Amino acid sequence: MTSYLPYAVGGFLFLALAAFALAPLRRRESGPAFDEEPPDPLQEREKVYARLADLEYDYRSGKMSEEEYQTLREALLEQAAALLDAEEGSR
């Protein structure tokens, strides 16, 4: 006679793990996106500076080419300048 208990336990574990793995997909934020608070300029600026520091580290450790480094660095510096201009304009 074959015991079905191991199959039942395995099936239950599979369903429990599947429900756990898929739970984030069911969670949706309600409401339109424009209800969110505007980003804090100081936090945004700090994020750009952190990205610049990470970029510099990656370049110096040989993880990227000079061309790629210069392109990304220019884009981040432009973003930082825009944030500074926006911050000065709001004063």
Image (cartoon, rainbow, N blue to C red):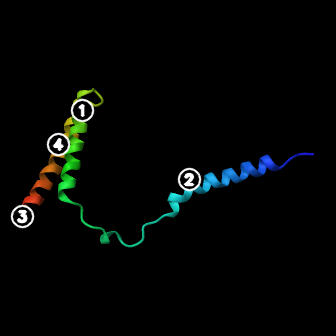
Query: Could you tell which of marks 2 and 4 lies nearer the N-terminus?
Result: 2
Q: Can you say whether 39 is above or below 10 in the image?
A: below
Query: Could you tell which of marks 4 and 1 lies nearer the N-terminus?
Result: 1
Query: Could you tell which of marks 1 and 3 lies nearer the N-terminus?
Result: 1
Q: Residue furthest right?
A: 1
Q: Which mark is residue 91?
A: 3
Q: Which mark is residue 2?
A: none
Callout 4 amino acid: Glu
Residue that numbered label 4 is attached to: 74
**What residue is drawn where x is 25% and y is 38%?**
54
Query: Could you tell which of marks 3 and 2 lies nearer the N-terminus?
Result: 2
Residue that numbered label 2 is attached to: 21
The nearer-to-camera label among 4 and 3 is: 3
Residue that numbered label 1 is attached to: 57
The nearer-to-camera label among 2 and 4 is: 2
Q: Is residue 62 left or right of residue 12?
A: left
Q: Can you say whether 40 is above or below 55 in the image?
A: below
**Mark 1 and mark 2: span between their CA atoms?**
35 Å
Callout 1: SS: helix
**Mark 4 and mark 1: span between their CA atoms?**
16 Å
Callout 4: SS: helix
